[in-house]
Every structure is written in C-alpha cells, then in structure tokens.
Amino acid sequence: MPKPTIELRFDDVTAGYGGLPVLEHLSFSVREGERLGLIGRNGAGKTTTLATAMGLADLMKGRIHFGGDDIGNASTYARSRAGLGYVPQSRDIFPSLTVEENLLSGLQGRSASVALPPIYALFPRLKERRRNGGTQLSGGEQQMLSVARALVGQPRILLLDEPLEGLAPMVREELMDAIVRMSDQLGVGCIIVEQHVDVVLEFSNNVIVLERGLAAYSGSAAVLSGEEALLNRTIGIQKC
Ligand SMILES: Nc1ncnc2c1ncn2[C@@H]1O[C@H](COP(=O)(O)OP(=O)(O)OP(=O)(O)O)[C@@H](O)[C@H]1O
C-alpha cells in the first residue's frame, strides 16, 4: 500500500502568549510536497503561527494535527521527531562549529554517509565550505546552513521564518532555488513566512494573508496575485 501523505492541519486555532490571543480562528492545511506562504504586516502573527505549530506558543482553542495525530499537547521535541522541521528567524547554527559539524549535530541517529550526500547535492556551496567555521560564512551561507541542518533530520513539513531576511538579491535567488529543489526533489512540504511578497506568490501553491491574527485571505497564490486591493490593504506590496 502506498504510504499516506503527511499533513499538518490547524482547525480553528486560537493561540498566543500568557493567556492573550494573537491568532484567532486560524484553519489551514499543508501536505508533503505542498508550499504554503504566510504574509502580513509586522505583528500580524506570522511567527506566532509557526511557533504554535512547534508548541512554542500557547494553543488556547482548536486543534492541530500532524500525520493524523493530534499534536496540540505534544512537546516541541516530539513534534520535531515526528517530522516537523523549523528554521527560526535567528540563524540557528553553532558559530563555533564547522559546516559539517553543524550538519552532523542534526543527524538524530542517522548515518552521516547516508544523510549528508543529498544535502550537499542541494547545497553545493556548503559542500565546498564544509570545513569552514560558522563565523566564516556569509549571511546567505549561514541561512543555507540553517535550512540544511533542519533537512538532515528528514522533516516532512519544514517551517521557514523569513529565510531571505538581510540577503542580497542574488543570494536570495540561490537560496530560494535550493528550497524549491528541496521541496520538489525530496517532497518536503513548506510553510514560508516572508516579507518579500513577490517571492511568496511565486513559490507557494497557497497563501494565507494574516491581518491582526485573522486570515484576511486563504487560498491560491495565483488568485491572490490578481487581488491588488487586498494586497495593498493588508501588506502594501513590497517588490523584490
Ligand atoms: N514571546 C512572546 N510573548 C508575548 N507576545 C509575543 C511574543 N512573540 C510575539 N508576541 C506578540 O505577538 C504579536 C504577533 O507577533 P509575531 O512575531 O507573530 O508577528 P509577525 O507577523 O511574525 O511579525 P514580524 O513580521 O514583525 O516578524 C505581536 O504583537 C508580538 O508583540
């Protein structure tokens, strides 16, 4: 029998911090191989959506399912072991370790000889720099390394928080190309939070526009591309 497709699903989720809701009534799903974009103004709740999926914010109402299981009360570690990967906004690498040591730290018991070749195939630049320390990498290389390190754990859905922040246009393109190849070749599903709306619209199958914690739009990226008034009202269009 073919393996069932793994899905992350929010059903009517209200979540926040210290008893105060930030997100309200948020529902969506993303499956392996699919790409969902999250956009919205500063403070709209994009990072909180990812944090809620990882168990780093308080789930106040609603349900979160992953791979058919209700994970609303699961620890962050259990979610990660189950196949939810997270690349937070701060580049999450160990600066004192080399590129390869950083990757090995994400192995979770897998053999390096099996785990690393596909990662280096996706990120040839990291292969070239595998003996370099984290501090010797450019901002773009550090960001590649934090995505690559998350991939070593073989996530089925990867949550990416502003991976392009602070990167020059050419480096952004290189990183996005690698993320698209990862999603296409490894069948990894993605949720991407990004300020660069054009990139999100091009990359994603579906998009959620968050406005003060509520979904002002949830649906196809292609349809949203034509909704200029909505895009202007909710985010203001930022060209790459
Ligand atoms: N750890 C926290 N404790 C309390 N409130 C928080 C915490 N993290 C975020 N918030 C609040 O939640 C709201 C949403 O923040 P969030 O970071 O999710 O927005 P965002 O859409 O990702 O914004 P940005 O684009 O600026 O990163 C903000 O009002 C913020 O102050």
Image (cartoon, helix red, strand yellow):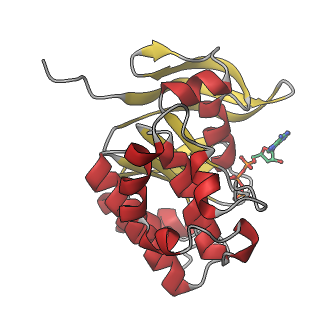
Instruction: Give 23 or 195, whichever is nearer the viewer.
Output: 195
Q: Which residue is drawn at 51% across and 56% down?
A: 148
The residue at the far right in this view is 18
Q: Which residue is drawn at 55% across and 33% down?
A: 108
Instruction: Give 170 or 115, whichever is nearer the viewer.
Output: 115
Instruction: Give 82 or 63, whichever is nearer the viewer.
Output: 82
Residue 59 placement: quadrant: top right
Q: Which residue is drawn at 65% across and 71% down?
A: 132
Q: Which residue is drawn at 67% across and 50% down?
A: 88
Looking at the picture, how far across and down is residue 220, in whole percent?
A: 33, 52
Looking at the picture, how far across and down is residue 63, in whole percent?
A: 54, 18
Using the image, determine if residue 193 lies above or below residue 13. below
Looking at the picture, how far across and down is residue 121, in whole percent?
A: 36, 63
Quarter of the image with the N terminus is top left
Locate residue 154 relative to residue 118 in the image: left or right.
Answer: right
Q: Is residue 86 visible?
A: yes
Looking at the picture, how far across and down is residue 31, in whole percent?
A: 34, 36
